Image (cartoon, grey):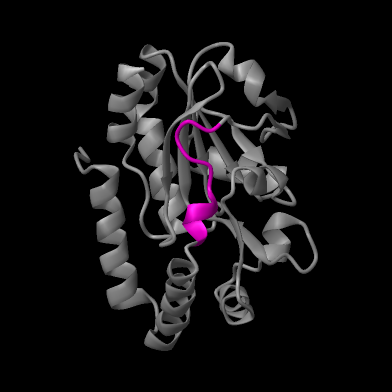
């Protein structure tokens, strides 16, 4: 039985990929892009606790429209922005929320995940990782931008992802797609204010679902 926390699983994946799977020249490009995000304080542009969460209507993996403010009428929402199902770290993070989902629901909350992927790609992510919460498609990243967590990738990193078999255009359905979300988790109260915001410039690091669960229980 896997008793690792999501943070521990992310640490193990980081050690594996950085130590054994990703060539050093590629790591240099990826690390430089992350360092640039940190240098430019990109994460500081995100919405923060106390801010009003903007409403949105996005399609889920089956094409059904999901509206944030409608969901908030049922209780708090844990909103998770992820890059896509092609991202190993995103998959670990989403599975972490799936493991905590029964307890989050018992606390009155629900989980909603958002990526810039096309709905078909979102469906693949949902089915592959057996996710029982809505996985929404923000094609064009309008909602991602409204929460302040969209950023543009440098050409060298875009080319590298394409070489790795992850061309953003194919997954996101937009020719010349250059943007992704920063890994971000928001907890939104029923009154539409943000209670918690965790935003990372480093795509290998994420919020810990167990910590999010504890916060939800205190709302």
Does residue 19 belong to the magenta stretch? no
**What count of labels does the image hold?**
0
Left or right for 56, reference 80:
right
In depth, the one of 44 and 17 nearer the eye is 44
The single residue placed furthest to the right in the displayed view is: 175
Q: Where is residue 136 in the image (x, y as percent from the top left)?
A: 64, 37
In depth, the one of 83 and 171 nearer the eye is 83
Mostly what secondary structure, the magenta segment? loop
- Image position of 184 with respect to 150: above or below: above
Q: Position of residue 179 (x, y in %)?
A: 65, 62
Q: Where is residue 118 in the image (x, y as percent from the top left)?
A: 71, 48
The N terminus sits in image quarter = top left
* Residue name at image x 72 percent, y 62 percent: 170
Left or right for 155, reference 112:
right
* Residue name at image x 39 percent, y 48 percent: 92
* Residue name at image x 70 percent, y 56 percent: 172
Magenta region, residue range: 42-51
* Residue name at image x 48 percent, y 40 percent: 48
The single residue placed furthest to the bottom in the displayed view is: 25
């Amino acid at each position: 039985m896997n008793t690792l926390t999501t943070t521990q699983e992310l640490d193990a994946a980081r050690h594996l990929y950085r130590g054994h799977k990703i060539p050093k020249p590629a790591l240099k490009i990826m690390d430089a892009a992350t360092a640039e995000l940190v240098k430019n304080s990109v994460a500081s542009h995100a919405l923060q606790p106390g801010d009003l969460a903007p409403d949105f209507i996005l399609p889920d993996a089956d094409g059904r429209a999901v509206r944030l403010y409608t969901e908030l009428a049922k209780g708090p929402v844990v909103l998770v922005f992820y890059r896509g199902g092609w991202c190993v770290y995103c998959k670990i993070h989403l599975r972490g929320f799936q493991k905590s989902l029964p307890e989050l629901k018992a606390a009155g909350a629900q989980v909603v995940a958002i990526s810039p992927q096309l709905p078909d790609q979102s469906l693949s992510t949902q089915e592959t990782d057996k996710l029982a919460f809505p996985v929404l498609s923000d094609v064009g990243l309008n909602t991602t931008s409204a929460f302040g967590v969209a950023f543009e990738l440098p050409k060298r990193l875009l080319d590298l992802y394409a070489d790795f078999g992850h061309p953003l255009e194919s997954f996101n359905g937009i020719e010349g797609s250059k943007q992704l979300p920063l890994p971000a988790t928001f907890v939104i109260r029923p009154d539409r204010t943000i209670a918690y915001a965790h935003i990372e410039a480093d795509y290998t690091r994420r919020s810990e679902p167990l910590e999010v669960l504890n916060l939800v229980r205190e709302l």
